[in-house]
Image: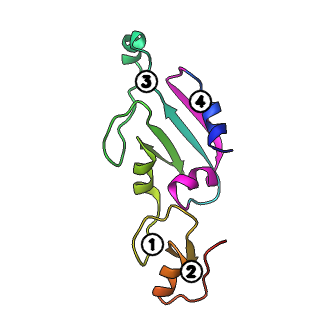
Amino acid sequence: MNANAIRSNVRAGAEESLIEDVPAFVISSGLGSLPAGRYSLLIGTEPDKGEQAASDSKRAMPACETCGNVYDKSFEVLMQGRKHVFDSFECAIEALAPRCEHCHCRIIGHGVENQGTLYCCAHCAKQSGVNRLRDRN
């Protein structure tokens, strides 16, 4: 499933759309390394102003767990059985992406790993004394 497939699964005009069975690599492209598996995304949209009174009785979109913003297009990421709510991929990356052991940047790509320690690249691993790792081609 790619981003276009996700967009096509979001119902136009719906208050929220649940996209199930999303492979980890689709989400990982925006969030960094995720454990292998399948995830669910819940994407919310704001109803038309004419529907506002009806929607007031429905649940409000929750606040982003990173910045606290309440956004009409927030989404949920289910990771290892725990639900996370974000208003942007930027906030999701900040909360979920691992940090490089050497330079402490967020790992939003493949990264490299040695005995459970994560690095953003082979250079950082080498700077930490791990010489046998190579970046993926």
Question: What's the residue type where badge 3 is placed?
Answer: Glu
Q: Which residue is mark 3?
A: 46
Q: Measuring 43% from the left and 76% from the top, which residue is drawn there?
A: 101
Whether residue 55 sits left or right of residue 132 in the image: it is left
Q: Is residue 80 visible?
A: no
Q: Which residues are magenta?
A: 13-33
Residues 89 and 78: in front is: 89
How many tags in the picture? 4
Mark 1 touches mark 4? (CB < 8 Å): no
Residue 28 locus on image (x, y percent): 57, 55
Location of mark 2 (residue): 114
Label 1: how many Cα within 10 Å (few below 14, some 14–19, many 20+): many
Q: Earlier in the sequence, mark 2 or mark 1?
A: 1
The percent coordinates of residue 115 (x first, y second) are 56, 81
Viewer-proximal residue, 18 or 104? 104
CA–CA distance between discs 4 and 2? 39 Å
